Image: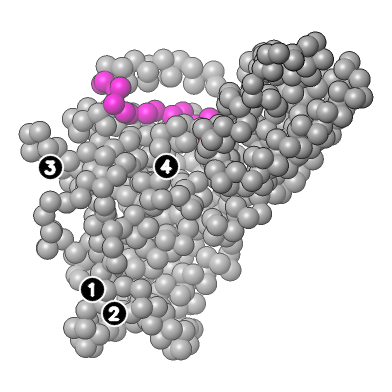
Amino acid sequence: MKPEALYSRKEAWLLTGSQHLYGEEVLKEVRNNAIEVAAGLDSSDFVPVRIVFKDVLTNPDSICKVIQEANKDRNCIAVIAWMHTFSPAKMWIAGLKILQQPILHLHTQFNRDIPWDKIDMNFMNLNQSAHGGREFGFIGARMRLERKIIAGHWENGKVQKELGRWLRVALAWNDWQGMKVARFGDNMRDVAVTEGDKVAAQVQLGYSVNGYGLGDLTDIIDGLPDDRIEAMLKQYLDQYQVPKKLIQNQDKKLRLWEAAAIEIGMRDFLEEGGFSAFTTNFENLHGLSQLPGLAVQRLMADGYGFGAEGDWKTAALVRAMKVMSDGLPGGTSFMEDYTYHFHPGRMQVLGAHMLEICPSIGLGKPLLEIYPLGIGGKMDPARLIFNVGEGGGINASLIDLGNRFRMVINPCEVLEPRENLPNLPVARVLWDPKPSLETAAAAWIIAGGAHHTSFSMALDAPMLRDFGEIAGLEAIVIDENTSVDRIKEQLRWNEVYYQHYTPF
């Protein structure tokens, strides 16, 4: 399913805590206030999914019941807990023990200001979020509950924006549950980091990974009617810069025809199988005339996750970051640190891949061209060529350490290339990693980060840290505060922690 379709269907439930001690009149006012808060958050431009009010919760049975419903409801992606009054936290224990959804503790109150000249004990009894939230916070800490906490007034744009960002993260986690990743062929031979425990991933992270022979794909491609391929070619001509010499060259036109057939075949396969992410491998192309480059780029632009050389962990992460970033300015793509510019005072990383970079991060209208690949032993593949504009970016890598999954995160500053790169016929992006190339590269290597990443200009480190907390991932952030010594120390302490950590 495309990411934008998820946002229109999913919802987060507002659970409002109180107790019977206050009497029916106060509880009625609590209910009306909670309905207004839910409606206000629901109408915020920052909040991407529906906010649904659930009844005021005043006893253990009602709490258990609504949490059981949240666990079962396919459209519920998270619960938001707000203690309008004081809500004794022992009432919440049984419900929180069975909670399977991500939870956000919204530490707010209905009124923004204290009515200095009118405040009385009735007002104080009704508006007890200040210490009601602390009681709820204690039980979360006592139960070692992983939760997000946002403090501030619910009408404040900063609070709504932070809530919306977290809900995007929760939606990506929801998308992983039951998600399917298709691997066309196996991973690149003798490569370590693209291997991993697919069973552990499904148990902890929720998505399944299965391999398929190239014959399953080529059977579809070989049976395609010409009119569907012609229609795809028309899309290419309408959407991209296509040199006239390409169309006039019969050999190149045939390569473009083959690329269109591969794209249609892959789309049919992925849609019919209900897949949200996939991998390919240039070492395993039996039955295909060329490496799928253009097809992969266009599928990623539509929200599919992708990993090259069978890298299913990166494919799943790209999909998650696609879901998080949908509708935000910027884009998200599969990426690889390809080569360095070690010029003193201007050190940079040139990111690219053989072909498979998503045009969602591109600057301007991409150029569609056909060039030799020089690897894989197949015909010259079609690809989109473009640069990437300036702005903030982030790279993230997901690796399997045996007893846990680690996500390595590195913010960067994206730069427009100063040169045209006329002899580099692939999509490319240039960035300056935080805090510097030397420190970032050393810290990344010490942490075991992969050469494949998910790259985004729409997301940032706090969102990925939130995702890691929900997913039970160890998150290592390399940023402007990083030093190699601090990373080493952090990894040593983490090693002790994860000796006793069970994520599922």
Distance Cα–Cα, label 3 vs label 2: 34 Å
| The N terminus, quarter of image | bottom right
Distance Cα–Cα, label 2 vs label 4: 36 Å
- On residue 341, the disc is 3
In primary-sequence order, the first of circles 2 and 4 is 2
SS of the residue under disc 3 = strand
Which amino acid type is shown beneath numbered disc 4?
A: Leu
- Residue marked by disc 1: 370
SS of the residue under disc 4 = loop
SS of the residue under disc 2 = helix
In primary-sequence order, the first of circles 1 and 3 is 3
In primary-sequence order, the first of circles 3 and 2 is 2
- x and y percentages locating residue 186 in the rendered image: 41, 56
Residue depicted at x 18% and y 83%: 245
- Residue marked by disc 2: 255
> Crowding near pointer 3: few (<14 within 10 Å), some, many (20+)?
few
Distance Cα–Cα, label 3 vs label 4: 25 Å
Distance Cα–Cα, label 1 vs label 2: 8 Å
Magenta span of residues:
467-484
| The C terminus, quarter of image | top right
Residue depicted at x 87% and y 17%: 22
Which amino acid type is shown beneath numbered disc 1?
A: Ile
- Residue marked by disc 4: 459
* Nearest to the observer: residue 120 or residue 500: 120
Q: Image height check: is 143 above or below 72?
A: above
